[in-house]
């Protein structure tokens, strides 16, 4: 049974009712609410088994210090952009990224088809968002549709790189990861390999 004094059964809010300590960290009442919601979301992810939270971040003041020092309004905390498949919310593995980057690789496959490919009527359809416009093209084979997706995805990553390359708010490791992802897709395309 979960301890009722713990947040989500695992976290300790050591800043509760401690206005002086909150102000020392830099939490205004408005920021306090946003920060606490972000912390609660991470704890809830562990509570339901979607992710884990580092021991350090189980204490609210530790998370709050990181959050205040790194927070970018309108962006999201991401745990698996830098470390593919990462399931731990940890200060060294999390970064703030804009929605455009966060959603960039959400081209999951369906029914065992390659990324960016679906069945449409009697053909295979490639689809990808490029510059905010959803593109579609039908092909006779899933491989040809996937190759079109690869080209579109490379184009979109290049667009995102141009847009954010000089944005000082974005952690440089995210740009490096974008370049790596783009280069991997290009290599897959050049070698006629499916991008996983």
Image (spheres, grey):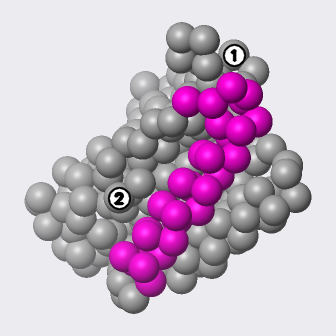
Q: Residue at x 60, y 46 (%)?
A: 149
Judge whether residue 8 is colored magenta: no
Residue 68 in sight here: yes
- Apparent side of residue 112 relative to residue 17 in the rendered image (left or right): right
- Mark 2–mark 1 Cα distance, whole angstroms, equals 27 Å
**Circle on res. 42:** none
On residue 131, the disc is: 2
- Residue at image position (61%, 19%) is 123
Q: Position of residue 22 (x, y in %)?
A: 24, 67
Query: Dot 1 corresponds to which residue?
Result: 111
Q: Quadrant of residue 146?
A: top right
Quadrant showing the C terminus: top right
Query: With 55 as the anchor, is 160 left or right in this view?
Result: left
Residue 2 drawn at (x, y percent): 54, 22
Q: Which residue is nearer to you in this view: 170 or 160?
A: 160
Tell me the quadrant of the picture where the N terminus can be found: top right
Residue at the top extreme, as displayed: 121
Seen at 56% across and 36% down, the residue is 126
The magenta stretch is: 138-165
Label pair 2/1, CB-CB below 8 angstroms: no
Q: Does the magenta stretch mainly form a helix, a strand or a loop?
A: helix
Residue, x 56% and y 49% (percent of image)? 105
* Circle 2 Cα neighbour tier, 10 Å, few/some/many (<14 / 14–19 / ≥20): few
Q: Which x, y percent locates residue 29?
A: 11, 59
Query: Residue 95 vs residue 92: left or right?
Result: left
Placement of 39 over or under 46, stated as above or below: below
Disc 2 secondary structure class: loop
Splitting the image into 4 quarters, where does residue 109 fall?
top right
Q: Earlier in the sequence, mark 2 or mark 1?
A: 1
Which of the two marks, 2 or 1, is nearer to us in this view?
2
């Amino acid at each position: 049974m979960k301890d009722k004094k713990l947040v989500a059964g695992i976290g300790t809010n050591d800043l509760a009712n401690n206005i002086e300590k909150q102000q020392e960290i830099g939490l205004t009442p408005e920021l306090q609410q946003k920060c606490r919601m972000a912390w609660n979301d991470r704890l809830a992810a562990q509570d339901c088994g979607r992710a884990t939270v580092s021991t350090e971040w189980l204490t609210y003041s530790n998370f709050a210090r990181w959050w205040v020092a790194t927070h970018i309004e309108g962006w999201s905390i991401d745990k698996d952009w830098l470390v593919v498949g990462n399931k731990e919310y940890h200060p060294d593995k999390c970064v703030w990224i804009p929605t455009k980057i966060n959603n960039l690789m959400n081209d999951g496959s369906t029914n065992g088809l390659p990324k960016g490919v679906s069945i449409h009527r009697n053909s295979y359809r490639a689809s990808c968002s490029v510059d905010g416009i959803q593109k579609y093209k039908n092909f006779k084979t899933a491989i040809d549709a996937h190759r079109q997706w690869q080209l579109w995805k490379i184009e979109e990553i290049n667009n995102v790189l141009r847009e954010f390359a000089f944005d000082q708010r974005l952690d440089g490791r995210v740009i490096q990861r974008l370049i790596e992802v783009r280069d991997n897709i290009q290599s897959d395309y050049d070698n006629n390999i499916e991008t996983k």
